[in-house]
Amino acid sequence: MKKYFVYLLTAVVAMGFAACSDDALETNPTDKVSGPALFDNATAALVPLNGIYRMMFEQGWSTTGNTQQCDGLTAWNLCAEVMGDDCIMGATGNGWYWYDCIYNVKGRYTSGAWRSYDLWNGYYKLISNANYIIAAEETMGGSPSDVNYVIGQAYAIRAYCYFMLAQYFSRPYVKGDADRMREKCVPLYTEPSAAGTPGKPRASVEKVYAQVKSDIDKAVTLLSTAGKQTHKTHIDYRVANGIKSRIYLALEDYDGALAAARAAQEGYTIATPAECLAGFNNVKQGDVMWGAEIITDQTPGWGPFLYHMDGISMYPGTQNYGYAAPKCLNTELYAKLGANDVRRGWWKTTKELKDEFGIDMSEDGTYCNLMNYKFRFSDPSQSLGDKMWMRVEEMYLTEAECLCRKGDEAGAKAVLNKLIQTRDADYNCSSLSGTALGSLTSTYTGSLLDEILVQRRIELWGEYGRVMDIRRLHQGFKRTEAQGYPTTALLNNCDTNDPNTWAWVLTIPQAEFDGNENMDDQVDQNPTLLKGQPEGKALENIYVTEEVEE
């Protein structure tokens, strides 16, 4: 029988995290939710809803330790960034994110302090609480607009979380591939669970994505008749469409992704050159669609996102981890920037670091040729800086990609020129054509689609989760020292050059198997392979043999 934590939604609001237990992994809340009146009406339901959002930017609640690399959505996105080919870690530092970078986390599934547990436990806690709100859909009082605002957000949260779980714990969706569709993904929970409710078996990739699609479509429908977000942390109709555009890109549904990306753009403005260079630390900026505003009395302990990214603002202070383990840009990608592109200012060369800031990277042996200057504290003395989860520029890039894939090259070029010319007045993609992509991300074809994706890599560096795009594009990548990677991060033990690799698929935490009678670690654990494919019985185990309709 599945064991669960005692989890109080009101405690989430007050503290931002749930009680922990060493012998169970919470994938559902208990039946001891505090205050049934919280779900009686839409106004009261904002309390547990805001509790969910607070969890998205709080530090450490999703693990039993290792909190320095566990602060919700920004940490999970940064994990996917360093797993890719553009966000280079110039040094090991204390090891935070380094093990994600070098693909040395699969074997740590027995611990509650590492990435498998962090992601699994974190996303399922968010799902658990969203399910309580969704369960009140038919009984919640209030105006239809207010009820739809609350319920619609809960559906969007559940869609987003299951989508991200699928990204981390299964191989990517491949349209038309029947075998891929029946591979095991993650368990689906769509109703509140009482203490002692049995855990669910792993559902197939097809079934999980069907649930994700159903949930995000429902969210968009409900939020279309609700008001705009009352705070940037909330998901409204536009943000829900932004999430939908990500999901539909992964589903290779370019009509759906295009419509969603266009709907998401309403009311936002592309960042000006001055805003581009302001540090990406203010959710009130006109291009920010979704994010967390961090105020002085809510600044978390040492370790969240900006501590890992900003190696300059605090230099040579004591909290300059962004210098000890610098995040740098792939030099091949930097070479794609025009001479007058304002985004060159997002990274500093070793010469610029020395000339502008007096930082000599050679003094302690740390190597970083293009150190992050894109993400910076708004006030280093107070550890202040907001967290951004979605910007409108992503929606323009999605629109351009979808138009190109649908054969409307003129439309795609117009959209891309409109966006990138705000960064580089000399930019013009009008001469480009075609949709050819290389088998590796470093095999540039010069096609229009290739250029759109290059600009996406530059624009969204550090904020989106690069390996997620690599997965959906069915490309591989190969790291080299020429790109700026240290030899210890070249991944010679991985076949990341293969789009069907299991290296990108995390192992499921042992705590789930210990508490879930419907999951068996001998047949349901993901392959620990970094190279090659499962064979024999191991190959049989990757498939769902039978799914029971609920």
Image: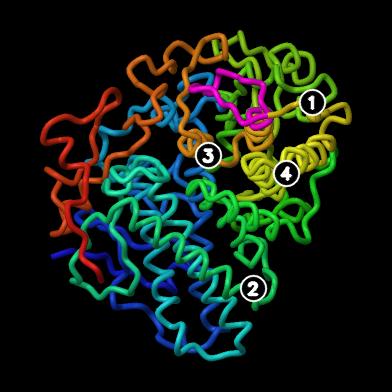
Residue 412, position in %: x, y?
Answer: 73, 40
Looking at the rendered structure, the secondary structure element under dot 3 is loop
Q: Earlier in the sequence, mark 4 or mark 3?
A: 4
Query: Which label sits in the foreground, 4 or 2?
Result: 2
Residue at mark 1 to residue at mark 3: CA–CA distance? 30 Å
Residue occupying image coordinates x 53% and y 43%: 304
Query: Which label sits in the foreground, 3 or 2?
Result: 2
The kind of residue on which mark 1 rests is: Ser
42 inside magenta stretch:
no
Looking at the rendered structure, the secondary structure element under dot 4 is loop
Asked if labels 2 and 4 touch by Cβ distance under 8 angstroms, the answer is no
Is residue 396 toward the left or the right of residue 527 in the image? right
Q: Earlier in the sequence, mark 3 or mark 2?
A: 2
The kind of residue on which mark 4 rests is: Ser
Residue highlighted by disc 3: 465
Asked if labels 1 and 2 touch by Cβ distance under 8 angstroms, the answer is no
Q: Residue furthest front?
A: 407
Query: Is residue 366 placed above or below 59 in the rendered structure?
Result: above
Q: Main secondary structure of the magenta part?
A: loop
Residue at mark 2 to residue at mark 1: CA–CA distance? 39 Å
Q: Earlier in the sequence, mark 4 or mark 2?
A: 2
Residue highlighted by disc 1: 431
Query: Which label sits in the foreground, 2 or 1?
Result: 1
In this view of the protein, which residue sits in the foreground, 143 or 279? Answer: 143
Where does the magenta region start and end?
A: 434-450
